[in-house]
Image (spheres, helix red, strand yellow):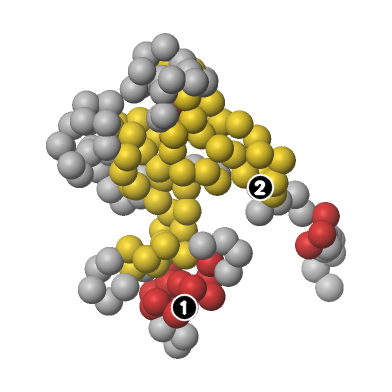
Amino acid sequence: MSGKLITVVPVYLVPMPQIFEFHCTNPDCEFEMPSGWGYYMYAIADDGERIHCPHPGEMGRARDVIGEDASQEEIDRRTGFNTYCFCIHCEAQVDLDLDRDEKACPECRSNAVKTIDELVDEQCPVCGEGTFVAEDTGAIA
């Protein structure tokens, strides 16, 4: 016996992530971004398309896309996390894998791209009057 103590925590005691709604506080501004955590898992299909793997069941969906017999190495190579981003220059909402993609807008090629987290508690980039907030919905995933 190695003498290492392993602590097992029941799943029901592991805190689940809160779900947020992301929007501008100005009632006249309709700027919002997708609700959730600000990012999501994807799997890369054989044709290169990134397929959203929704929670719960991300790994099941990833295996559906990649193949049930895929090795762990292949799963690691063909999965990632897209972060919701916003281009200040052209106002496009884009999804970028910050570990793989250049932090540039695929629409206009500008580097004036901010992640959803970088926008929170800042002046709204669309109307300039409200504050972009992450409002806790009270729901958990």
Q: Circle 1 sits in a helix, a strand or a loop, which is it?
A: helix
Residue at x 59%, y 39% (from the top left corner): 20
Q: Is residue 20 left or right of 99 when viewed as pictured? A: right
Depth order, front residue of 47/10: 47
Look at the numbered discs 2 and 1 and tell me whether their residues touch, using CB distance below 8 Å.
no
The total number of labels drawn is 2
Q: Residue lying farthest front?
A: 28
**Farthest residue, direction left:** 108
Residue 88: % across, % down: 28, 26
Upstream in sequence: badge 2 or badge 1: 2
Assign the N terminus to one quadrant of the image: bottom right
**Outermost residue to the top:** 129
Q: Can residue 42 be seen in this view?
A: yes
Asked whether 20 or 32 is in front, the reply is 32
> Residue 2, relative to residue 65: is it above or below?
above
Q: Residue 6 carries which label?
A: none
Identify residue type, mark 1. Answer: Arg
- For mark 2, what is the residue? 17
Q: Position of residue 10 (x, y in %)?
A: 83, 62
x then y, percent, for residue 116: 44, 34
Q: Quadrant of the C terminus?
A: bottom right
**Is residue 120 visible in this depiction of the protein?**
no
Please tell me how crowded label 2 is: few (under 14), some (14-19), or many (20+) other residues with Cα within 10 Å: few
- Residue depicted at 51% across the width and 34% down the height: 22
- Label 2 sits on a secondary structure element that is loop
Residue at mark 2 to residue at mark 1: CA–CA distance: 23 Å
Q: Does 27 sit left or right of 99 as displayed?
A: right
- Across and down, in percent, residue 96 comes to 33, 47
Q: From what the image shows, is residue 5 above or below residue 24?
A: below
Residue designated by label 1: 63
Q: Residue at x 27, y 31 (%)?
A: 91
Q: Left of 125 or right of it: where is 27? A: right
